[in-house]
Image (tube, rainbow, N blue to C red):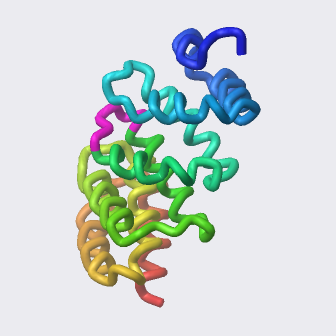
Amino acid sequence: MDLSLQATLEKCNSTKIDLVKIKDAVLRNTDLLDELINMATDLNYNNHPKALRIVELMTEDNPIFIENYIPKLIEQASHYKKCSAVRGISRILYFVVLTPEIKLNDFQKEALIEASLDWFIGNEKVACKVNALKIMTHFSDEFPWLKDTLRDLIEKEYASQLPSYQIASRTAIKKFNQ
């Protein structure tokens, strides 16, 4: 990259094509990953949602690539306020929990459940709610109290939610009933 990572990020628009180019540059030069994660988790940095979107694209390809940064991402998860950042972190963490090679400790699991529950019951957009529900459903066998809690929440919100929420809800309830 001719420009610094930060300058490149600030110069680009948020199209997937531009963000994928930056992602590919980071993958070619992994020394840039620390900088990218720092930008993605710095809530005072105006472009943290863009940086987080690049981390999301990397995680979608291979969650193992960000394994060393998972504690930092989990720690910051509940602090994001911008809609695009909350959606991004919820999706990143969803990919992380689905990756069997990544082992989370009990504290990390509990922090993920807490953040996911906040997103699910809060005023987040439906994509974030769906990711949160999928994260909590993943942990529902290990944390059985989640099943009743989520059943109650789903029952209250189901009729007023969008189809993607309803589909994820039916999938969760089906898993709870097995």
Q: Position of residue 38 (x, y in %)?
A: 45, 32
Q: Position of residue 98 (x, y in %)?
A: 56, 65
Q: Position of residue 130 (x, y in %)?
A: 43, 56
- Camera-side residue: 75 or 78? 75
- Camera-side residue: 77 or 144? 77
Tell me if residue 141 comes above or below residue 34 in the rendering: below
Q: Position of residue 157 (x, y in %)?
A: 28, 60
Residue 163 seen by the camera: no
Residue 54 seen by the camera: yes
**Is 81 part of what is drawn in magenta?**
yes
Q: Quadrant of the N terminus?
A: top right
Q: In the image, what residue occupies the spot 50% across and 47% down? A: 69
Using the rendered view, name the quadrant where residue 79 is placed.
top left
Q: In the image, what residue occupies the spot 32% across and 66% down? A: 107
Q: In the image, what residue occupies the spot 63% across and 55% down? A: 64
12 left or right of 69 in image: right
- Camera-side residue: 164 or 46? 46
Instruction: Tell me where the magenta segment starts and ends, as one range.
Output: 79-85
49 left or right of 27 in image: left
Q: In the image, what residue occupies the spot 23% across and 65% down? A: 156
**Is 97 part of what is drawn in magenta?**
no
Single out the residue that lies furthest toward the front.
31
